[in-house]
């Protein structure tokens, strides 16, 4: 069962469904905040596909108080601590009307990029236009019930005259410092307390005022209750920090049941997003802003990052070369499966489609590892190179995707990449090539020997690299490592065949031969014992098409080489070492193997 179906099990879809989510605009929203946005979007899309009458509403909780100075903002904000976010001026230079507008506008701008279509609302409008008046009255009247539930469910004590409401102080404008002690059905009595909270100082004012039409707000657990009952909300997921027993969602659910006799909306609990393996904290400014990441990664990649795993599992955003290439490759593989593999399951296809910004169908995706390598080779036209690989011109859709991948590659290289992760074609043989083993040197020479007659395209060259490894012989990974070393001074890289195809044949050949190799050392390093060769030949006999022998001498030492061609066309080489005195015998042995 796909996770969206599992998450929505038990939902009554015979009536219109409202999905709700919201965000407090107290600073720049972090990339982790997109997890809930996209999980709700996935639920929204899944219900729409089923033909359910569904709406997705996303709120800006801008009546919440400023409870800390937003990261990167100066001390001038201290005077505003405790005021509703929508009543505080925006940072200097901002085009927004207020602080809440400033931060939520940036966050909401990401939604459109990601293909999230929802209805936005702001709590200031909900309160000021009286949409919550009925809920405020009902919840204030139920104050004793709320106090009992706070005590019973979350073991938190409130004074006997405590009421679930905070007015905006008529004297100082703060909302986070006021406490309501009485409600007569029309007005509340409140005090703006100097020491109610640690992060703001109340002015000491006492007053009596109507709680309606925007003169204050409910604490957010009760605000949740009001939203759930008033909108009304059928689906609202919450991050793992809210879902504990006795946690905020638990308290809100109990209040809804006691005051309205209703069950809480369907919950979709979801895990955090870890950045570079560490949980983000918006207060410390650690992590990455949602807008910044959306400016960096293509939208389908960001959706894939958040939606490829079921909600309860944490998502990881690790902007390293290895993890990014893996992320792009996984999406590309999902695309290939979805459109070109008849065995792909419905769940695999649904996950892929959930990650599309809008339905696009199949297309040629440009491998991100190669994009990263290509943008670092200034002499190349990236799109022309991919057209060579594709074998035809890129269409408009493919060009659009390539442009976004080139952009992501450049942003990565400029902002996140370590020196090790950068990759530049070396103008001369790098000094570290001196550390290559003799077998690796032999491999580079073997490859050089094959280049003249090679078809100069990625697939053919990739095959050639494997051939060169078997004909050295050397373990494949050591061969590839030698190649990346002499070309890029790195230990690893994207598909080698494609990289070679971007380069000039004569230039590559010269570079491979720049590495010196001592023939006798190579023979010694790669020769195998006679019985081992005999065993290999016996095991592989059915697959061997032909064999031939060559012999070589250098001073007193010689080598006999058995060249083997398999029925599938692959070539192998087995080498026997012929020390002084044993030459005749070893050659005879080699010829015996060949016959
Ligand atoms: Zn005050």
Image (cartoon, rainbow, N blue to C red):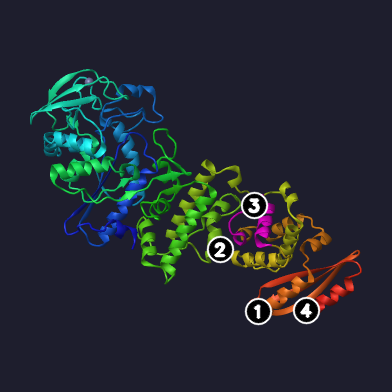
Which quadrant of the frame does ligand 1 lie within? top left
Q: Quadrant of the C terminus?
A: bottom right
Name the N-terminal-most of marks 1 and 4.
1
Residue 594 circle label? 4
| 2 and 3 marks in contact (CB < 8 Å) | no
Q: Sequence-wise, which precedes: disc 2 or disc 1?
A: 2
Residue 75 occupies which quadrant of the picture? top left
> Is disc 3 placed on a helix, strand or loop?
loop
Provide residue 273's location: percent of width, then percent of height. Answer: 41, 45
Q: In this view, does 577 lie above or below 148?
A: below
Q: Nearer the viewer, residue 50 or 414?
A: 50
Other residues around mark 2 within 10 Å, as few (<14) / some (14–19) / many (≥20)? some
Q: Are marks 4 and 2 in contact (CB under 8 Å)?
A: no
Question: Which label's residue is closer to the chain start, 2 or 3?
Answer: 2
User: Where is residue 70 drawn, in percent x and y?
Assistant: 37, 30
Mark 4–mark 2 Cα distance, whole angstroms, equals: 41 Å
Look at the magenta stretch and give its main secondary structure: helix
- For image coordinates 47% across by 58% down, the residue present is 330
Q: Give the range drawn in magenta.
A: 475-498
Mark 4 or 2, nearer chain start: 2
Residue annotated with mark 1: 567
| Label ID, residue 388 | 2
Asked which secondary structure carries label 2, the reply is: helix
Q: Nearer the viewer, residue 222 or 29?
A: 222
Q: Which mark is residue 491?
A: 3
Q: Do the residues labelled 4 and 3 touch (CB within 8 Å)?
A: no
Picture coordinates of residue 146, whole percent (x, y): 17, 36
| Mark 3 surroundings within 10 Å by alpha-carbon count, few (fewer than 14), some (14 through 19), many (20 or more) | some
The residue shown at (51%, 66%) is 392
């Amino acid at each position: 069962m796909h996770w969206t179906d599992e998450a929505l099990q038990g939902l009554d879809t015979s009536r219109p469904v409202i999905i709700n989510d919201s965000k407090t605009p107290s600073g720049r929203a972090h990339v982790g905040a997109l997890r809930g946005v996209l999980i709700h979007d996935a639920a929204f899309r899944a219900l729409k596909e089923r033909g359910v009458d569904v709406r997705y509403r996303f709120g800006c909780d801008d009546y919440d108080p400023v409870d800390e100075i937003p990261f990167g903002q100066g001390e001038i904000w201290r005077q505003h601590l405790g005021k509703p976010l929508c009543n505080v001026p925006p940072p200097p230079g901002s085009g927004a009307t207020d602080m809440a507008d400033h931060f939520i506008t940036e966050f909401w701008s990401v939604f459109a990029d990601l293909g999230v279509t929802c209805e936005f609302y702001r709590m200031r409008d909900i309160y000021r236009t009286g949409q919550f008046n009925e809920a405020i009255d009902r919840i204030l009247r139920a104050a004793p019930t709320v106090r009992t539930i706070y005590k019973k469910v979350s073991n938190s004590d409130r004074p006997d005259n405590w009421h679930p409401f905070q007015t905006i102080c008529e004297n100082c404008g703060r909302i986070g410092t006021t406490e309501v002690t009485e409600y007569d059905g029309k007005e509340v009595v409140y005090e703006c307390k100097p020491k109610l909270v640690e992060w703001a100082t109340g002015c000491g004012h006492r007053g009596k005022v109507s709680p309606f039409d925007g003169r204050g707000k409910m604490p957010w657990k009760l605000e949740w209750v009001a939203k759930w009952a008033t909108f009304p909300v059928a689906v609202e997921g919450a991050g793992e920090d809210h879902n504990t027993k006795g946690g905020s969602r638990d308290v809100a659910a109990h209040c809804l049941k006691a005051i309205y006799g209703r069950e809480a909306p369907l919950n979709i609990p979801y895990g955090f997003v870890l950045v570079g393996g560490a949980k983000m904290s918006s207060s410390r400014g650690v992590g990455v802003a949602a807008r910044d990441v959306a400016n960096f990664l293509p939208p389908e990649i960001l959706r894939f990052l958040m939606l490829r795993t079921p909600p309860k599992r944490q998502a990881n955003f690790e902007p390293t070369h290895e993890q990014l290439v893996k992320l792009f490759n996984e999406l590309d593989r999902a695309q290939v499966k979805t459109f070109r593999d008849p065995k792909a399951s419905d769940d695999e296809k649904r996950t892929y489609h959930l990650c599309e910004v809008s339905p696009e169908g199949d297309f040629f995706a440009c491998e991100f590892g190669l994009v990263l390598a290509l943008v670092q080779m200034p002499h190349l036209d990236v799109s022309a190179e991919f057209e060579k690989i594709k074998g035809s011109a890129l269409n408009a859709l493919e060009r659009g995707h390539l442009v976004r991948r080139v952009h992501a590659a450049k942003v990565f290289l400029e902002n996140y990449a370590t020196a090790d992760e950068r990759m530049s074609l070396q103008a001369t043989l790098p000094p570290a090539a001196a550390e290559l083993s003799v077998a690796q040197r032999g491999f580079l020479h073997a490859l050089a020997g094959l280049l003249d007659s090679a078809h100069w395209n990625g697939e053919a060259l990739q095959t050639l690299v494997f051939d060169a490894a078997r004909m050295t012989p050397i373990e494949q990974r050591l061969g590839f490592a030698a190649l990346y070393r002499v070309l890029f001074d790195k230990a690893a890289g994207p598909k080698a065949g494609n990289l070679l195809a971007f380069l000039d044949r004569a230039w590559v050949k010269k570079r491979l031969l720049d590495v010196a190799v001592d023939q006798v050392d190579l023979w010694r390093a790669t020769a195998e014992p006679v019985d081992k060769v005999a065993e290999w030949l016996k095991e592989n006999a059915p697959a061997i098409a032909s064999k031939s022998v060559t012999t070589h001498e250098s001073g007193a030492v010689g080598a006999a080489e058995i060249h083997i061609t398999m029925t599938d066309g692959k070539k192998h080489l087995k080498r026997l070492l012929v020390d002084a005195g044993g030459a005749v015998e070893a050659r005879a042995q080699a010829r015996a193997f060949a016959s």
